[in-house]
Image (cartoon, helix red, strand yellow):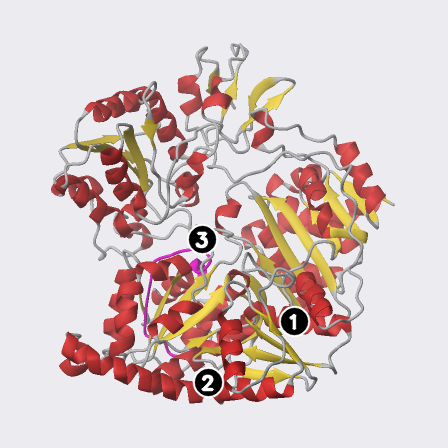
Amino acid sequence: METTRLIIVAVGGQGNLLASKVLGEAALISGVPVRMSEIHGMAQRGGVVESAIVFGDAESSIISDGEADILLGFEPAETLRALNRCSSRTMVITNTAPLPPFTVSIGKGEYPDVDLIKNLIRQKTGGLVAFDAMKLAREAGSPMSVNIVLVGALIRSEVLPFTKQDVMEAIKRRVKPAFLEMNLKAFELGYEGAGETVEA
Amino acid sequence: MHKLLRDTPGEKIMLLGNEAIARGAIEAGVAFATTYPGTPSSEISLNLFQISRESDLYFEYSTNEKVALEVAAAAANSGLRTFCMMKHVGLNVAADPLMTLAYVGVTGGMVILSADDPSLFSSQNEQDNRYYAKFGGLPMLEPSSVAEAKEMMPAAFDLSESLRQPVLMRTTTRINHSNAFVTFGELRPRKTKGKFIREPLRCVTVPAVSRGLHAKLLEKLGRAGKMSDSSEFNFIRGKGKLGIIANGVSFHYAEDGVRDLGIEDKTSIFRMGFSNPMPETKIKDFLKKCEKVLVIEEGEPFMEEAVKAMAQEIGVTIPIKGKTPELFSRLFEYDPAMVREKLASFFEVDYTPPEKIDVSNVPEIPNRPPNLCSGCSHRATFYEVKQAAKDMDVIHPTDIGCYTLGFLPPLNMGDFVICMGSSVSTSCGFSKATDQKVVSFIGDSTFFHSGITGLVNAVFNNHNFTLVILENGITAMTGHQPHPGVEMEKFGMPDQGQINIEQLVRSLGVEHVSVIKPFKVKKSIETIKEALEFKGVSVIISQEPCILYARSMKMRSARPFMVTDKCTDHKDCINNIACPSFFIQDGRVSIDADTCVGCAVCAQICPENAIRPLKN
């Protein structure tokens, strides 16, 4: 089976690890081999959290710089920061709602303009889907569901070897019952929302 | 029922590496498990802790790794299958019992797991603990994948029992924190009650006994070497003359690299999974068939040096390379592209690495370093100590935990840290060696781990410093594990004991002890000032639960604050305490109501009283 390499970048607390687990579960449901790697501990205290997910026949569970087939970014500046993980063929999907790092508040750096971020990514990679996933997450019921909105957009792009139904089943298995309805709504909103906002 | 307890052989499930290791221990019939938590090992113990509460597995969070290993050594010498797990630097703490337990051996199977951290994702160093196996004389297994980590656990227990020797299981972060499919095996029954048979000539390590034990250890290692030669964990893939020797995750990078380069027919890969003692006969045979050999191992040249020595013994003079400036580094973890490129260069295969994206015109992106959480009590304590010690030349030895992050600006509270517990003992040294004021920080769990002995030293030798014990009621950094100061009723374990830190500190002979509630800013600063004036050892205990833990246990609900129109833009709040809930909107300070928990520290330091509770 062909190998598909996905990198997810997020800010600690955005639910990156749950998103990865949902995708892993979907791979299990659809019989796709998968290995994932994540970073815990000190890295999670408000810093950048990165997951690497390798679908298909490769044995490695991490992804080298320049070798991601898909980059899913939960925060626009973090998506841009991860550009070195991409090649000119990489498909990029990003949330456009900024979460400025604290260093900006204390005057140590300037947050880049979101339109500039989008233009740079569009120029250098194989395609960009950019949309305000926070808005859709709020619509689904909570900013906490932004991770599943982005999973919806990822599935809409049809770059992963499994179906929408597989992922919805995976969400049912991995999400706590109390939050299931909200997350299924978030998934649908992401799936539909990404369809309307594809930027080639 | 805990998912790792399911008696469903053949079930395929996605597991974190650390869950797979815990499952492997359960499948092996482990009866007794001890640990001190540390990333990247912590989820192994977290799962075993949960499992112990719904089964007859005995599990304990021990005070530190030395204690954990000694507790485990007794269980393993009572005939129980025993598992002791820790992060790599934890094995330094446990090294004293380790070295002599290797002489004594065990009667029940014993596995000691060391979770190494190449690239230092969450550690103070990246030491390569394979040397402990060689140093102490322990058989060692190293998995290359999550699934194999589970498979190796029962094998490690069997190996330990057949040699009557503890076995070192060595993993790296990319095993512990990877997820992959695992197939459940059979569950072996647990034998939970042992019996200690007195054998003083094996178990009482006076010199006369230990001389004999050392000889016996070497004899065991000889047997282990033969087992290593026939072990299924040492295998060869491929029949080519271009040799590769690899361990751990590097093995899979090598496999992927060889396939990507299309040189499967020309290469053979020796995967070392039972790596101490090394499979000497098998390696020598392998070397004889190769034209050249590349050794791929993260960390130190552990295999490389041994393989070169073996080649010398049999007169093989082929090139054997690993750690050289052109090839592999002793620094940091490897990755698939790096290994592919080195394979191509060493074996002279045509290969053009994929073109990198030109990022030269990407604007500088502001850093996002990890930070103390919104509402973290450590931030308040740091601010208060800073205010109380204003105008003094202060050294701040600090320790290992979330609060290490206090060294970052604008708090800048952290000047020296080397290992768990070092804040207290280095304070002793700094206070004698300099005329500077010394105010040090240690977390409650770290204080129990290895701060107490330093404090005893300080009282005994009459040192002069202030120790701030940050009592947040939990081991926060590693994922909220209990420690001896925690009221265990919260965990549904009312029979556990509880040690009161204030009483303990007083009983150690510390004359000046005070307690602060760090969210009361003014009062805390006054109390700290008094402690700083005391000549001798003073201890301040700063009591406030970890906010993440308090919120997850519903002990505290969020009551967000806001910045009102009274704000005249001093920015004292941002400049002095730098809580991540602050952000600048249209040039003015605002508070993110989604993340503010309402500790009210900023409200107490605002010169205009402009920060108020957000009215709903």
Contact flag, marks 3 and 1 (Cβ < 8 Å): no
Q: Earlier in the sequence, mark 2 or mark 3?
A: 3
Disc 2 target residue: B228
* Residue drawn where x is 49% and y is 78% of the image: B309
Which mark, residue B125? 3
Q: Earlier in the sequence, mark 1 or mark 2?
A: 2
* Residue drawn where x is 38% and y is 68% of the image: B132
Disc 1 target residue: B254
Near-viewer residue (B411 or B600): B411
Which mark, residue B553? none
- Where residue A31 appears, as percent x and y from the top left, is 69, 72
Is residue B30 highlighted in magenta? yes
- Image position of A105 with respect to B326: above or below: above
- Where residue B94 appears, as percent x and y from the top left, is 30, 62
Distance Cα–Cα, label 3 vs label 1: 26 Å
Outermost residue, right side:
A200
Element class at badge 3: loop
Label 1 chain ID: B
Element class at badge 2: helix
Quadrant housing residue B235: bottom right
Is residue A194 highlighted in magenta? no
Quadrant housing residue A74: top right
Q: Earlier in the sequence, mark 3 or mark 1?
A: 3
- Where residue A130 appears, as percent x and y from the top left, is 78, 42
Element class at badge 1: helix
Asked whether, in this view, residue B291 is left or right of residue B360, the answer is left
**Is label 1 on the same chain as label 2?**
yes
| Residue numbers of the magenta segment | B27-43
